[in-house]
Amino acid sequence: MDASSASTQTNVALGLSGRYARALFDLAVEARAIDAVAASLSSLKDALAASPELRELTTSPMVGRGAAGAAIAGVAANLQLDALTTKFLGVLAANRRLAALPAIIRDFRAMVAGRKGELTALVTSAHPLSAEQQAALAGKLKAGMKRDVALEITVDPAILGGLVVRIGSRMIDSSLKTRLESLGQALQA
């Protein structure tokens, strides 16, 4: 492991989500199941994005521990998640930490990327990116950063158009919203 991936893993592990992600990552390494857990978390992330009911289950304080545990076990079975991820979700439900799931997934993915020597780019777009657009963006970032880049993409219609890309402390904001705000400030001056 090089210094930059050690740094990435250290930085990720600072918050609550990072501690849970670190625990899952360590268990996955020990079980030699990193790829299986990463695939399960990817399926879970997609399900959270597609299902308002699942998001409500994971964030509602009105859902008790037992009900949340049973429901998340059903979700895990339906999504055919691996055994380690399923057990981990049970722990999250028992500790009332399901709301941290999106951040845990993000942190876990950053740890996997760090282990592979990749950088993680947090990309915000106004609309979902096609596979071709994602591949083109990853290629451009790889050329600029001189390292492989894993994309962590979120959609935020509020940016109107363009992209916001964060890699570590670097940020490239080419969103239409920012451009319009800059134009507005220039016209006021």
Image (cartoon, helix red, strand yellow):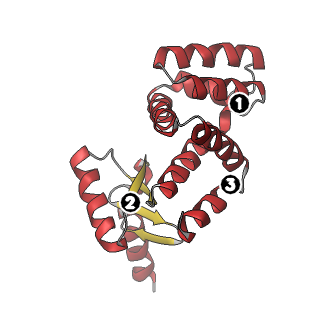
How far across and how far down the image is residue 155, in percent? 41, 46
**Of the pair 26 and 150, the residue shown nearer to us:** 26
Q: Amino acid at mark 1?
A: Leu
Q: Quadrant of residue 140?
A: bottom left
**Which disc number belongs to residue 92?**
1
Mark 2 packing: few (<14 Cα in 10 Å), some, or many (20+)? many
The residue indicated by pointer 2 is: 149
Secondary element under disc 1, as helix, strand or loop, is: helix
Quadrant where the N terminus is found in the figure: bottom right
Labels 3 & 2 near each other (Cβ < 8 A)? no
Q: Residue at x 36, y 67 (%)?
A: 174
Quadrant where the C terminus is found in the figure: bottom left
Mark 1 packing: few (<14 Cα in 10 Å), some, or many (20+)? many
Q: Amino acid at mark 3?
A: Ala
Q: Is residue 64 visible?
A: no
Q: CA distance from mark 3 to mark 1?
A: 17 Å
Whether residue 7 is situated above or below residue 135 in the rendered picture: below
**Of the pair 88 and 165, the residue shown nearer to us:** 88
How far across and how far down the image is residue 12, in percent? 63, 56
The residue indicated by pointer 3 is: 13
Q: Residue at x 55, y 24 (%)?
A: 54
Q: CA distance from mark 3 to mark 2?
A: 20 Å
**Of the pair 19 and 158, the residue shown nearer to us:** 19
The numbered mark, 3 or 1, whose residue comes first in the sequence reads 3
